[in-house]
Amino acid sequence: MVTAFLDHPGPLAFAHRGGAAHAPENSWRAFEHAVSLGYRYLETDVQATADGVALAFHDRSLTRVTGQPGRVARVSYRDLADVLIDGTEPIPRLEDLLTAWPDVRFNLDVKDGAAILPLAEALRRTNAWDRVCIVSFSAARLWATRRALARPVCMAASPLGTAVVRFASGRTGRPDHSGPGRGPRRTRPAARPGTAGVIFGRESARQRGQAGRSAVPVAAPPVAETAPAPPAAPANLPEPAIMPAHAERHGAVAGRLARAGVECVQVPGTLATPALIARAHSLGLQIHVWTVNDTASMERLLDLGVDGVMTDDTVALREVLSARGQGHPRVP
């Protein structure tokens, strides 16, 4: 099943953590500023309090952003009333953000296993299924989140899924010059209800063990704040080329990704090569890049054909897209 999350004309402009170049990250002020600029897509992170309230907050610890000690998952929401981002901004509840702008879409990075069920409840209460895309650096966490949701939503590939896209496609790796948003989206096989995997449509043995021990998704081991890069290509394999044996697996890879609900690949801008972009497009996937804050890199990546750009500098990206005639601002 292809959701409505990506059906806006591209390239998509994402306000990373609300647009952290202009206001404290993941704060109401940042999100409001991005929306006032015409942004339809906001990127944020999901943590949850000890009493199960989903928050727009990046770190597991409160210290870096608020200056206060403690972990988000070990304090109640009431105890966070006086804990302020950058000393000035209250920590937003995810449900409040989803309610504030019913037409705005959210790219949600699930940062902790404890946030999965509160996230699912926030989506249920706001009926925001078609307005979110779920992301995580942990394949296990993505799988657990998908299992917890009452309805299918857009999913981004995990780092391992990105590696599968990078090396398992059957295309030759030629760049796709049609550009993002120019023409109909590719149709991929529909997901089977209840399919569990995030990458290949089924859970790993370790994930099955976690599910068997508890009905509550188990948190994955601590994840680094910076995404791990997919493995480098073999030295004897040119970047644009794909081994012939991989070609016959192209349809199978597309089907497995579709059954896992994967609709996009999100990578650092430095990893978005013409070959990766072409392979993602050949599998019916959009490719989004993060976190791109200089205009030269924005221009280069848009020229390559990426489908979305995430930035802290929301003003700069808006100006670049407008100058290229590719701006599609939200109209209130």
Image (cartoon, grey):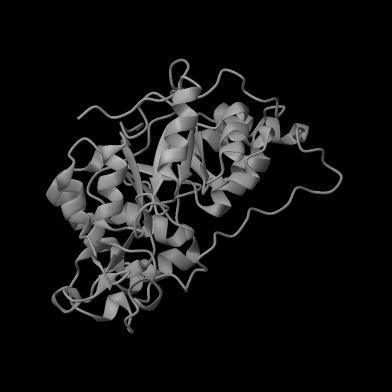
Above-or-below relation of 143 to 34: below
What residue is at 37 percent from the left and 71 percent from the top?
65
- Which residue lies most toward the bottom here? 69
Residue 25: percent from left, percent from top: 36, 59
**Image quarter hosting the N terminus:** top left
Q: Where is residue 222 in the image (x, y as percent from the top left)?
A: 47, 73
Which quarter of the picture shows residue 238?
top right
Residue at 24% over, 44% down = 151
Number of residue marks: 0
- Left-right relation of 180 to 108: right
Residue 122 location in percent, x, y?
18, 55
Q: Residue at x 33, y 84 (%)?
A: 69
Q: 317 or 250: which is nearer to us?
A: 317
Q: Which residue is drawn at 62% across and 56% down?
A: 229
Determine whether 193 is above or below 79 in the image: above
Nearest the eye: 276 or 35: 35
- Residue 281 lies, in percent from the top left, at 56, 28
In depth, the one of 228 and 90 nearer the eye is 90
Kindly tell me whether residue 261 is visible in this rendering: no
- Quadrant (top left, top right, bottom left, bottom right) of the C terminus: top left
Is 210 left, or right, of 27 in this rendering?
A: right
Query: Can residue 33 be seen in this snapshot?
Result: yes
**Which residue in the rendered view is the most extreme toward the right?**
236
Q: In which quarter of the image is residue 71?
A: bottom left
